[in-house]
Image (cartoon, helix red, strand yellow):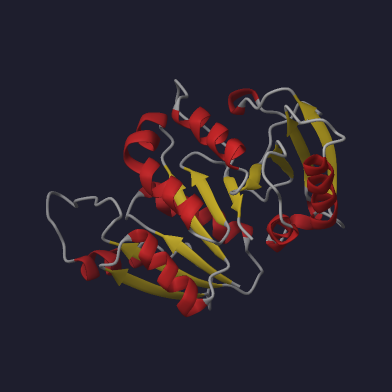
Amino acid sequence: MNVLLLTDFSSGARHAHKYALNLFAGTKVNYFLLHSDDSAESPIEGMKLDKDEQLANEVKTYNDLFPEHTELTTINTSRSLIDAIRHMMKAQTIDLVVMGASGNSKQFTQELGNNTTSTATKIKCPVLIVFQESTIKNPLNVAFPVDYTDKLQVKCVERLKALPTSHKFVIEVLEINPQSPASSLTKNSKNILDKGLEQLNFIYKKDIDLNIKELETSNKKEFDLISFAAKNLSVYNKVFSQLKNMDKPLTKQPPLYILHA
């Protein structure tokens, strides 16, 4: 498996990478650490270091993060972030892109919003977004919001199975203001969900409206991961709109796993 880690030299990015390393512990993974000129710069003691030197210094901070014998390749590029990711996808057949997001909703909107939303929508590869205060743990309870306004694809849904702990998942498919159960789009989407999630533990749950702030499982527990199809644009827009408009820090916000076919 090839995993692309995006870095802007921030603690938020490192936290996201720690999450991914824990998630894939015991799995054969080739990691690629990418910095592009589009990433936010973090001046060190007021000095602007050469980009290569800055990336080399960043790698040193990972010495205690990566297990022994883990493959880590660094890439420093002048390409735009999206172009750099697309180039890596062609060159290395990337299976997952991992990026961090600030734990503060204001910073999420003003500083990371553009890069986060662009990566999640424009990159045809699953994207894992980890918030700065997301708990580092193997996910168990997974929320999968859907409203059947866009056609799902089996290959897209099956991306959940690519996560090494998926056999332990308890997935709640949250049907948000669903259309008539008899509509052809709803029927087709449910068939695709059933096929894509087969062999996984999942249930359907009626949800009048998605509220990220108060989202909890049927057993009144916190979700560990929120996953949805990128092409289900109304769900995508609802999730990101709520995150950006939260009036408090995104403390322990579950990571987002955004699926592409």
Residue ID at (82%, 45%) = 190
Q: Between residues 150 and 35, which one lies in front from this camera angle?
A: 150
Q: Residue furthest left?
A: 47
Residue ID at (85%, 48%) = 201
Q: Between residues 31 and 208, which one lies in front from this camera angle?
A: 208
Q: Is residue 108 above or below residue 3?
A: above
Q: Between residues 249 and 171, which one lies in front from this camera angle?
A: 171
State which quadrant residue 216 falls in: top right
Q: Is residue 216 above or below residue 227?
A: above
157 left or right of 132?
right
The spot of residue 66 in percent (x, y) is 49, 67
Residue ID at (54%, 41%) = 134
Q: Is residue 14 above or below residue 67?
A: above
Q: Between residues 24 and 100, which one lies in front from this camera angle?
A: 100
State which quadrant residue 29 falls in: bottom right
Residue ID at (49%, 59%) = 123
The spot of residue 153 in percent (x, y) is 72, 56
Q: Which quarter shows the N terminus? A: bottom right
The spot of residue 105 in percent (x, y) is 42, 30
178 left or right of 71?
right
Q: Which quarter shows the C terminus? A: bottom right
Count of marks placed on residues: 0
The spot of residue 61 in percent (x, y) is 36, 61
